Amino acid sequence: MTMTEVLKRRLELVFNWYQGMVNAETGMLEYLYIPETDRFVRENCPIRDIASVWDVELLGQFLHRQELHSLITTSLRHFDGYLVERNGYSTLDSSRLGEPSSIAHSAFMMLARLHAPAPRQTKKIAALAEGILRQQQPEGAYKICFEDFPDHGEELYSGEAMLALMEAHGPLDDARCLESAERAFAFYDAHYFRCGRVDADLLVFFANWQSQACRLLFKSSARAALKRDAARYIFGMHDQIIERGFYRDIESYPARHVSVEVACALEGLNDAYSIAHSSRAERYRRCICTGLKYLLELQCTNAGTEKERGGFGMSLSERAQRIDITGHVASAFMKSMRNGIDCG
């Protein structure tokens, strides 16, 4: 069986797992499943809850399955109730979220709306994009929180915002989205990554979101210099991860790793692979195969409880399953299939 065939079968299991994660009363996804006690745990993590709607949409489109459309519709209607208008743009209401409203909340609402079943609600997407655009600072960075809270999440949320703007600029026909992402890329490359401001423990996650956004910049730009700089930035992040021994350690000491970090690493590395050539592409392919081997071993297939099958634990020793982890793994699998990764 080819790797493509293996991943396709595993993604079908993931889709079935999502079906088992739908709460019969709310019609929305449960947050965390504990196999040892066969129970769900509901935690307040709106960013991951919203992002998981987008994850389900992407997987359903990839597999041509529609059984979770009701979940998508119910979830979007629920989170639409959190939207507040603010002088020509919209954000999610901090008082109802239970946490400071940030560009990450807006980004995932945009992505979920962009990939939702028709009809597309362009006005809501545009209002959310407008909010992110107004958060951009003169030097190109984004202010993270909309209200007067200390910013946090710079190493993740900026890339998520850039990705949402890149995906929205075509459907919205708004050049400002592309221009904003270009300015942000220049800042986070020169004044964040190359200055060593990314914490070593967060580099994989930073590289994931920045790579996803900058790959779209690379693909969409007609400017040779920008394409060259975007590729250099993407390659620089992933080369550093590889040179620090991340994939070597997955192969040698798999029990030390956690699933979400490996999955996020493969998401971004697949984006890097898609624009790489020759020896660098082969180096990336080998690393992707190392990560895929770990994740395939981690996925619950025949053992465990019925609800557990198809999902991914926190690590090889921790069976608890969280919706965002499964979403990252599904994305890594889909990207590996699109890239035609062969681990033979």
Image: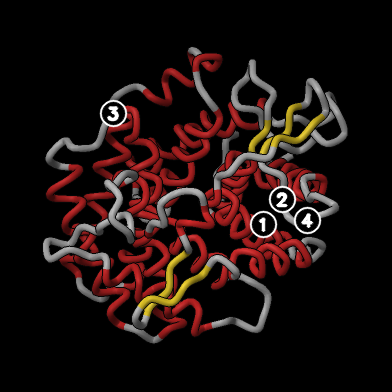
Alpha carbons under labels 4 and 2: distance apart = 8 Å
Q: Callout 3: helix, strand or loop?
A: helix
N-term mark: 3 or 1 = 1
**Which mark, by number, is residue 200?**
3
Residue 113's x, y, as percent?
A: 56, 71
Q: Tell me the kind of residue under disc 1.
A: Val
Q: Is residue 148 above or below residue 207?
A: below
N-term mark: 3 or 2 = 2
Q: Would residue 203 appear left or right of 258 to someone viewing this image?
A: left
Front of the two marks 4 and 3: 4
Location of the N terminus by quadrant is top right
Alpha carbons under labels 3 and 2: distance apart = 32 Å
**Which mark, by number, is residue 56?**
1
**Which mark, by number, is residue 26?**
4
The residue depicted at 25 percent of the width and 59 percent of the height is 142
Question: Mark 2–mark 1 contact, CB under 8 Å?
Answer: yes
Residue 302's x, y, as percent?
A: 85, 28
N-term mark: 2 or 1 = 2
Residue neighbourhood size for the residue with mark 2, other residues' Cα within 10 Å, grouped as few (<14), some (14–19), many (≥20): many
N-term mark: 1 or 4 = 4
